[in-house]
Image (cartoon, grey):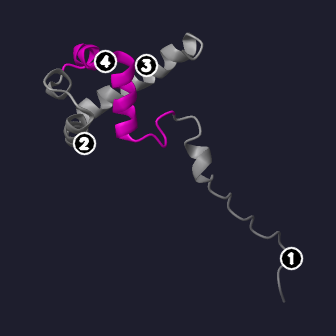
Amino acid sequence: MTSTSDPVPAPEPAPGPGKTQARNPLHGKTLEAIVTALSEHYGWEELGVRIPVRCFTFDPSVGSSLKFLRKTPWAREKVEGLYLFMLREQRRQGGA
C-alpha cells in the first residue's frame, strides 16, 4: 500500500546566468575594454597619476597594461575600481 502524503516539492531552479550578474557593470567587459575606456577618458598621464604603476607612466600602451594587470591582482582591482568610479561619474553628469 502506498502512502498518500504530499509529494516533496521540487527544488527552486538556479537563476539563469543573466540574472546573477545583471547589475554588475563589469560583467561581460574585457580587461582590454576597461583599460581602453579609461585611457580614452582620462588619458595615460592622468591614469598614471590616479594609479601610479609603471605600465601607465612609462611608455604606456594597452598591450603592456594588459600584460601587467593580468599578472597583478591588486593593480587590476584598482583599475576595475577606477572604471566603476568613471561610470558613476558619467551617470551623474548625464551620460557624458
Q: Nearer the viewer, mark 4 or mark 1?
A: 4
**Camera-side residue of 82 and 94:** 94
User: What kind of secondary structure does the magenta stretch mostly adopt?
Assistant: helix
Q: Amino acid at mark 3?
A: Phe
Is residue 35 one of those drawn in magenta? yes
Query: x%, y% of residue 33?
Result: 40, 36
Circle 2 packing at 10 Å, graded few (<14), some (14-19), many (20+), is few
Of mark 2 and mark 3, the one earlier in the sequence is 2
Of mark 2 and mark 4, the one earlier in the sequence is 4
Of mark 1 and mark 2, the one earlier in the sequence is 1
Whole-number angstrom distance, CA of label 2 to CA of label 4: 21 Å
Residue under numbered circle 1:
4
Determine whether, in the image, residue 13 is placed left or right of residue 77. right
* The disc label shown at residue 70, or none: 2
Residue under numbered circle 3:
85
Determine whether, in the image, residue 70 is placed left or right of residue 92. left
In the displayed orientation, state which residue is furthest to the top: 93
Residue at 72% over, 65% down: 10
Query: x%, y% of residue 89?
Result: 49, 14
Residue at 30% over, 26% down: 78
Of mark 3 and mark 1, the one earlier in the sequence is 1
Residue at 60% over, 48% down: 18
In the displayed orientation, state which residue is furthest to the bottom: 1
Determine whether, in the image, residue 27 is placed left or right of residue 43. right
Of mark 4 and mark 3, the one earlier in the sequence is 4
Q: Nearer the viewer, mark 2 or mark 4?
A: 4
